[in-house]
Amino acid sequence: MLEGGDRVFSTVGFDAASMSDVAREAAVSKATLYVYFQDKEHLFTAVCAERRDRNIGELIELLDASGPLETTLNAFGAELLRRITQPHVIAAHRIIISVAERMPDIGTEFFAAGPMRLTQAVAALLDRHVEKGTLKIEDTFLAAAQLLELTQTTVFRPRLYAAISAPITDEEIKPVVASAVRLFLAGYGT
């Protein structure tokens, strides 16, 4: 049901999707769908949460404080870009943005369990490096947010706003991430 919902929401958007469409795509009855999901909003939230939680968990696993920081940040940044520029992720962001004003709880939950959780995980990595003396940062949460923004620059937002659907390439990823990490380490390294 979640996969069917994901396909429908990604294809037609939240507003145009119906529970009937999802039931048809998931090959279940509409009644069965309503047993599990109170309404379309709850189904959409579940679809986003499942993918987001899996992606965020896998990204957090890359934040290993035992390896060289520059290597870790480059690997993390590259994988972050690969994941957040996937068409279904871009579609989910667009849908969240489009419904957040009328359903702020959905936007708040999406942000707290996604971008905020990831920023906190990066901040925890930075805390460990501050403790080791490899970084000098007063506010690791702010520094983590800055790093995430630097890593996404020129790649994520054009896809989000301009409907660029071409798959991201390593040729796009490497210079953006490498530059972001160098700039970050120049500002916060010891």
Image (cartoon, rainbow, N blue to C red):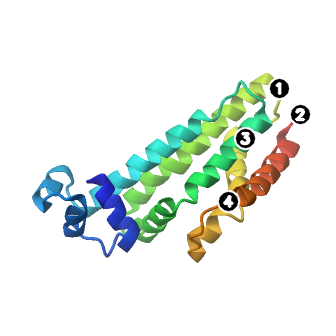
Q: Residue at x 84, y 47 (%)?
A: 182
Disc 4 designates what residue?
169
Q: Amino acid at mark 2?
A: Thr
In the displayed image of the protein, which residue is found farthest to the left?
31
* 159 or 98, nearer to the observer: 159
Q: Residue at x 61, y 44 (%)?
A: 119
Other-residue count near label 4 (Cα within 10 Å), few / some / many at <14 / 14–19 / ≥20: few
* 140 or 31, nearer to the observer: 31
Disc 2 designates what residue?
190
Cα–Cα gap, marks 4 and 3: 18 Å
Badge number at residue 73 = 3
Cα–Cα gap, marks 1 and 3: 17 Å
Q: Which comes sooner in the sequence, label 1 or label 2?
A: 1
* 20 or 42, nearer to the observer: 20
Q: Nearer the viewer, mark 2 or mark 4?
A: 4
Q: Which comes sooner in the sequence, label 2 or label 4?
A: 4
Determine whether label 4 and label 1 are within 8 Å by CB.
Answer: no
Q: Secondary structure at mark 2?
A: loop
Q: Which comes sooner in the sequence, label 3 or label 2?
A: 3
Disc 1 designates what residue?
133
Q: Residue at x 51, y 64 (%)?
A: 87
Q: Secondary structure at mark 3?
A: helix
Res. 161 image quadrant: bottom right
Cα–Cα gap, marks 1 and 2: 7 Å
Determine whether label 1 and label 2 are within 8 Å by CB.
Answer: yes
Cα–Cα gap, marks 2 and 4: 32 Å
